[in-house]
Amino acid sequence: MKTSFLQRFNFDSLRVRLLVLVLLAIVPPVILTVYGAWKERQQAIAMAEDNLQQMTQLAATSEARLIEGARQLMSVLSTVPELRGNPRTCARFLADVQQRNQGYVNFGLIQLNGDVTCSAQPLAEKTNLGNRKYFQQTIEQNRFFAGDYVFGANSRKHAINLTYPVLNAKGNIAAVLFASLDLSYLDRFVSDIALPQGAVLITADSQGTIIARRPDPEKWIGTRTAPSLYDVMIKVGFGTSEVKDVDGVTRLYAFAPVGTTDVSTFKVGIGIPIDEIVAPANRLQMMELSTLAIIALLALAAAWFVGDVIILRRVKALVGTANQIAAGNLRVRTGIKHGKEEISQLARAFDTMVVALQQNEAERAQSAAILFMEKERAQVTLESIADAVITTDKLGHIEYMNPVAEELTGWTKAEAEGLPSSMVFRIFNGFTKEAVPNPVEAVLELQSNVELSKDTVLLSRTGMEYAVEDSAAPIRDRDGKLTGVVLVFHDVSDSRKLAIQLSHQAAHDPLTGLFNRREFERRLELAIEALTRQSRQHALLYMDLDQFKIVNDTCGHSAGDELLRQITALLQPLVRDSDTLARLGGDEFGAFLENCSPESATRIAEKLRQTICSFQFVWQDKIFPIGVSIGLVNFSTNVLSLPDLLSAADTACYIAKDSGRNQVHIYRPEDHQQAAREGEVKWNERIQQAFESDRFRLLSRRIASLKDTDDNYLFDELCLYMEDGAGKLIPPSAFIPAAERYHFMPTIDRWIIRTAFSQHAMTLQATGGIGLHMLMMRVSGNSLDDEHFLDFIYTQFEEFDLPYASICFAIAETTAITNLTRALAFIDALKQRGCKFALDDFGSGMSSFAYLKHLHVDFLKIDGNYIKGMTIDPVDYAKVEAIERIASVMGLQTIAQKVDDPDTLTQLQKIGIGYAEGKVISEPVFFYPVAAEAIA
């Protein structure tokens, strides 16, 4: 009996079951094929991203080089004198520049009011560019700027405008140089970059206007990019993204900025159609699926018509192989001989598929190994650096700590992992002791970098405290999402202690430990300012020891220093904690009595006088009675200024001395007239007479090198003396203070410079420059304030035809800091022409370390007070050593002053001081011939 088709298709039929098995066996290859095709597409896109990134970076680099070349050209042009000439000369010069640089549409000069006064291409009418962004940005930021796209009204060309500041002699902007870059030249500059099939290269300005495009540049330059493309270019800046382009094609774009933000705001993008990227993978998928479909049909036909045991056994073998593949065994094979029949072809397809899967697995394993090596390299780097590093997740919980972080926090990585960062990284303000906001939490809140204040202290788990400086930054994934925070910090305890020490030294006298004049005057200034808001009664004492000079001259400086220390010990217990006691210089002391009535101030002043008067100073076998003259000034709201107050105290002290010494004089307004009659006016008259009678004399002192090197300088330092009526020389310390007070210093400085230049020029002419020494001469603060002084110096150099390198100017440390702006301008102006500069009396306050890096000097002349005491005082020795070490780091040379004995000279050579001057080097001699007997 014949069976119908429906009967034969019964599920219990072997053939039907075989068909079902065949169908089930086909399913895994289909899934694997689809998965493989999906992976191929992803790999194709990833590879395309890498290639696009490289091409985009290449294009950005090429365009950045073009713009950088333009910046360098404009930097050179900005210094050319022709730009500062008349407009016709300037225009001819710029026209010549344009002819030699064919890629530019125009060059021109814009004045500060925006008017174009000079142009390589003639302008039809007066042009003002004051409202242009590129002009305004250059004025505001004082730097090169690349503007957005423009279409030239005169040139009728697509261009971008580049601007560069033109500075005057003082370093201020005098005008702005602009250049119009032809965009066709920019397009040709990237024309050698080979683009893939269907790819597009776009360069756009900050407004999204296309300034370069390949292909079809003529069609697209000057048009706007698609809004979606513009948004991504601005937000991504550097990276890749899929964007629907202005022509409706969806492309994979890579973006890169053209140089850094100080070069341009342009962005370069190269895009390839997504369809082009995934087309090979899609074709491969279709081929594989088609192959599987053919195999399936053949298998079904074979199973339907050949349902015998041999076929079923082979099908079972295939199913078993498929199950092992699904279980992850990629070494399995079907074991079926490859032939031409359908099952053999299916077996071959299985085996081929397994080989492909094995290759994919090997590639994944290799990628995993590379990632592991990169992770290990980063791990080793973090373990080795000197900074402490902590990373957290996006909740602020610790994920990683390097060994330095473990040491400073007192937590191990294993203990800290998973804990909140605030528990491990505990910080507070070192001065207020108040808690400081956790930087990790601040980054998570602000989504940006955070730095700690300079006074932050880390409290370790062990109780140790470390002064730290740190910064915290967000960690973001490929999509820009915050995934954690990295905290980097380091121990700055030593440097912070040094800063505190230097700050203390800047405000204190190194000999007595009292406040110095600078700090004393600062506190007075604050009190005077406070009187404008609230009336208070204060008092100022100005004290001058009466017998100090006798002790100093009889027993030497060591005895004088010891006397000052003992006087300090006597004075300190007699003033209140709220009072300020200071050494003002030499044997002068000052006391600022806050909130003190005139009666109380008088009692305190008298008590100080009696205490010192009853004190006898003993040095070796000598006993000296000591006295003190005290000037007392009571002040409240009637004080006008700090100079007025100090002058009043000085006057009162002068009257106390002049009235018999060892007494207290309370200042009265009429005291100024008396002091002027009896004291200061005398020096005023003597200085005027010295000018009229030509009684100023220049002496020179040799400055010797302490190092045996070929590049040593030969120095002569000039000193000004005044000759009295009997032919004796008066040292500068006697009359220079009065000369400064009565503004004689600019005239004196001019006399020194002209006299020294004249003699130096004659020496140069006579010797031909062989063995010629460099002259060092001091410049006063009054001369720095003279706006014509620098021009006078230039005139003297030209008149006497002296090389600038033969002169070294010295400026006192306090003068340079007080007149910092003028000192910087004076030093820079003459150093550009070759002069050398020295900072005189360096270290007297130690505050100039903060300013030293701004003062472009060549030598530091160390304060002689430190030099004299360094052989017996380890603190003075350490200060001299510290100054030499800092000077060496900054590339400066040191000169020791007042080197009066061989032991001091030996110590200076040991430290490494470069030069020295003093009695052990040479005595001062006349700089030009005068009567020999005048030096007696």
Image (cartoon, rainbow, N blue to C red):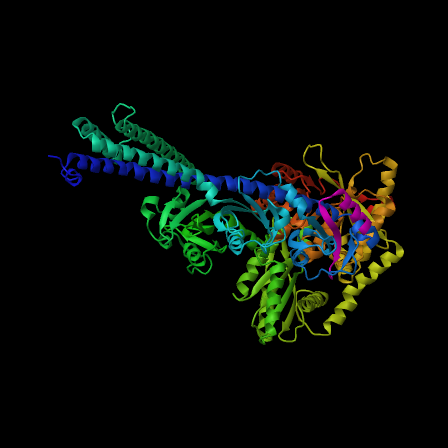
- Height in image: 335 above or below 514? above
Q: Quadrant of residue 776?
A: top right
Provide residue 653's location: percent of width, then percent of height. 68, 66
**Percent coordinates x, y for residue 320 in the rendering:** 21, 31
Residue 246: tell me if it is visible.
yes
What x and y, as percent, mark residue 579? Answer: 55, 66
Q: Which of 564 and 396 is in front in this view?
A: 396
Query: Quarter of the image containing the N terminus?
Result: top left
Direction left: furthest residue: 1
Q: Residue furthest front?
A: 1
Q: Is residue 850 left or right of residue 325?
A: right
Q: Measured along the vertical axis of the image, is residue 218 above or below residue 338?
A: below
Q: Is residue 861 visible?
A: no
Q: Does the magenta stretch include residue 92?
A: yes
| Residue 602, image x, y percentages | 60, 72
* In front of the other: 368 or 820: 368
Give the side of residue 513 with respect to residue 648, left or right.
Answer: left
What range of the chain is rendered magenta?
91-113
Q: Which residue is nearer to you in this view: 226 or 533? A: 226
Q: Nearer the viewer, residue 498 or 597?
A: 498
